[in-house]
């Protein structure tokens, strides 16, 4: 079984290398924006969109043009990768996965990618990596890179430079350990497992929110582009990156533990994207409870449920397990003991009490137990051959699950 994995390290560039990396990232951004402008112009004039090969021809012309001679100083492959990125942005737009591609701004995800492993040398013993036109770069070697290098991305975040090394390697098909578990996602408890394990809410954003707001206010009071403004801006970026780090760390730890100890994980198919849609509603249909809804939306985005599921999906696959989404019908209102379905079972947000048999439990744990039950029902349905929905890690609900729930 082939496994793709990325390893990320902080770079320790010298000042010349820092200057070069800023320049290369700028050149890639320039090429991306110029190509996007060109495509827009062609569209307005009724011409066909250029493909990747056509854009590469344009790139050669730009590199040889007297107007932008500095483009020649940047390595050519990363510039071409910027065109590939634009192609992907268009493809995502046409597939309705993303909004129309936008122009890139300086300082927003500054990065560039080397796609050719032949031009990259990794010297782990000396904690250094060789990249075209940058030479040997030192990095903070925190763990060993496994597998053969496929490509390398250099990026900047909050004033620091990072390298992400994508590798591929052959691994033994893993045997999953452990049984099945259901997970209920919530705001008060980030995740509750049907075995009783509870993951506390992340709320990293809220904790840093005050600091962030103050830093942003301080920045807005400064004269734009002055030295003090730049200092204030760096502070805002530092807080942003601290929030991101805390969140990433938490999610990775949680998903690693869950995927190592379970062969099958059932989650509710909540469609995080739909839930976190504008709280205000549309002009035709203004939302009724903007306040509570925007609170929930914030919590969803804040806690990274989507990222949590994405990580669970690929980590379970690494360990030979599966992530399976089930429809969230009545998971919060069904009694796991007698099966009675009623909204009255849920007296408060936190407490579940069955009005028929008197079963009492934490509402999130009840949700997790019901997700587990629904998951088992769906699997039983698939085995009997009634329906064959996609097997593993689907993020989509399907009619098969609905029929099984009956
Ligand atoms: Zn009951």
Image (cartoon, rainbow, N blue to C red):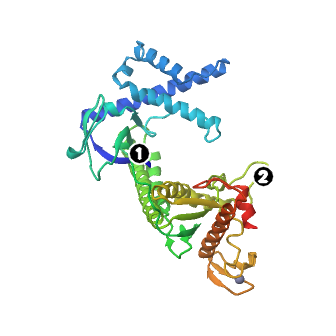
Q: Position of residue 64 (x, y in %)?
A: 40, 14
Residue 233's disc is 1
Horizontal side of residue 197 vs 387, given as left or right: left
Q: Residues within 10 Å of mark 1 (few under 14, many from 20)?
A: many
Residue 285's disc is 2
Q: Nearer the viewer, residue 316 or 163?
A: 316
Q: Quadrant of residue 191?
A: bottom right
Q: Position of residue 10 (x, y in %)?
A: 31, 47
Please identify the residue farthest to the top as the structure is shown. 66
Q: Residues within 10 Å of mark 2 (few under 14, many from 20)?
A: few
Please identify the residue farthest to the bottom as the structure is shown. 358
For label 2, being within 8 Å of ligand 1 is answered no
Q: Position of residue 365 (x, y in %)?
A: 59, 75
What residue sits 53% from the left and 54% below the top?
A: 310
Give the answer, above or below, for where 122 lies relative to 322: above
Give the answer, above or below, for where 269 lies relative to 229: below
**Looking at the image, can residue 76 be seen?**
yes
Q: Quadrant of residue 21?
A: top left
Where's the C terminus, which quadrant? bottom right
What residue sits 42% from the left and 27% below the top?
A: 79
For label 1, being within 8 Å of ligand 1 is answered no
């Amino acid at each position: 079984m082939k496994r793709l994995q990325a390893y990320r390290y902080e770079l320790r560039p010298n000042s010349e290398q820092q200057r070069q990396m800023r320049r290369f990232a700028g050149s890639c951004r320039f090429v991306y924006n110029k190509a996007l402008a060109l495509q827009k112009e062609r569209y307005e004039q009724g011409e066909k969109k250029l493909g990747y090969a056509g854009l590469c021809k344009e790139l050669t012309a730009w590199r040889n043009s007297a107007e932008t001679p500095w483009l020649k100083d940047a390595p050519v492959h990363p510039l071409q990768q910027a065109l590939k990125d634009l192609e992907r942005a268009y493809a995502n737009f046409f597939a309705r996965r993303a909004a129309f591609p936008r122009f890139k701004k300086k300082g927003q995800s500054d990065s560039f990618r080397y796609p050719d492993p032949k031009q990259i040398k990794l010297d782990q013993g000396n904690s250094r990596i060789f990249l075209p036109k940058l030479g040997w770069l030192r990095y903070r070697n925190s763990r060993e890179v496994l597998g053969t290098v496929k490509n390398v991305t250099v990026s900047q975040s909050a004033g620091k430079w990072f390298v992400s090394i994508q590798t591929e390697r052959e691994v033994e098909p893993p045997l999953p350990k452990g049984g099945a578990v259901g997970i209920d996602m919530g705001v008060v408890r980030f995740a509750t497992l049907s075995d009783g394990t509870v993951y506390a809410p992340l709320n990293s954003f809220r904790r840093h929110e005050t600091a962030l707001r103050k830093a942003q206010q301080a920045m807005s009071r400064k004269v734009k582009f002055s030295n003090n403004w730049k200092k204030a801006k760096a502070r805002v970026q530092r807080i942003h990156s601290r929030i991101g780090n805390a969140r990433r760390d938490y999610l990775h730890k949680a998903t690693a533990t869950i995927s190592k100890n379970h062969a099958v994980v059932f989650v509710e198919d909540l469609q995080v994207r739909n839930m976190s849609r504008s709280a205000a509603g549309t002009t035709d249909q203004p939302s009724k409870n903007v306040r509570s809804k925007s609170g929930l939306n914030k919590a969803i985005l804040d806690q990274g449920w989507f990222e949590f599921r994405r990580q669970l999906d690929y980590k379970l696959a690494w360990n030979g397990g599966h992530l399976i989404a089930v429809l969230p019908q009545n998971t919060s209102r069904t009694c796991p003991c007698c099966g009675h379905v009623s909204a009255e079972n849920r007296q408060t947000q936190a407490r579940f009490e069955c009005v028929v048999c008197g079963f009492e439990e934490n509402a999130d744990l009840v949700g997790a137990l019901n997700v587990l039950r629904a998951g088992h029902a769906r699997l039983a349905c698939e085995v009997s051959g009634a329906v064959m929905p996609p097997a593993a890690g689907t993020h989509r609900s399907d009619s098969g699950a609905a029929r099984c729930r009956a």
